[in-house]
Image (spheres, grey):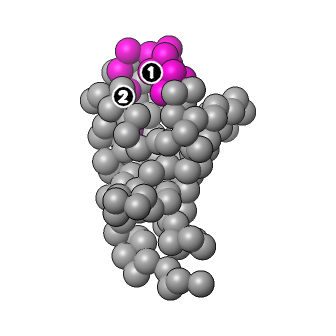
Amino acid sequence: MAAPNAQFAEIGKAFAQHYYQTFDTNRAALHSLYQNESMLTFENEQFMGMQAIMTKLTTLQFQTVAHQTTTIDCQPSPGNGIMVFVTGNLAVDNNTTTPLKFAQTFMLMPTPSGSWYIHNDMFRLNYC
């Protein structure tokens, strides 16, 4: 088995920052981060493949969103993958007075070209 990527924490944190910046400014551009074998679980609904995932993400029922991450934890995984667990706040449609709490987990896998794609993505709003 290959040794885990020594920069897993830096890669995972940089990925999360890129993902949320892209989500907040140009959601349609997220398509390059998913592949046909990717799976998204979004609030208990599952979507398989880049096209189904992008349909879900681009038809969410809000106009604007701003992600503010609170924590980003990363771990190496077999196959040179990186697991990224994020918690934070969402300001939906400019509502900054009562942000929504969220948690999201990504399983990143390397591509042959040396970049990364999201193999698994799980998202949940956190209600008290």
Q: Is residue 60 magenta?
A: yes
Residue in view at x 50 percent, y 85 percent: 3
Q: Is residue 98 magenta?
A: no
Q: Nearer the viewer, residue 95 or 106?
A: 106
Image quadrant in which you'd find residue 83: bottom right
Residue 70 visible? The answer is: no
From the viewer's perspective, is residue 95 above or below residue 80?
Answer: above
Q: Residue at x 36, y 28 (%)?
A: 27
Q: Is residue 45 above or below residue 124?
A: above
Task: Check disc 2 and give the amino acid type.
Answer: Arg
| Residue 20 in the image, given as x and y percentages of width and height | 36, 41
* Residue 9, percent from left and from top: 41, 71
| Residue underneath mark 1 | 58
Mark positioned earlier in the residue sequence (1 or 2): 2
Image side of residue 13 versus residue 53, left or right: left
Name the spot of residue 45 as percent of width and height, x first: 70, 29
Callout 1–callout 2 Cβ contact below 8 Å: yes
| Residue extent of the magenta highlight | 54-68
In which quadrant is the N terminus drawn? Answer: bottom right
Q: Which mark is residue 27?
A: 2
- Three-letter amino acid code at disc 1? Thr
In the picture, the disc for residue 73 is: none
Q: Answer left or right for 61 relative to 66.
A: right
Percent coordinates x, y for residue 126 in the rendering: 62, 39
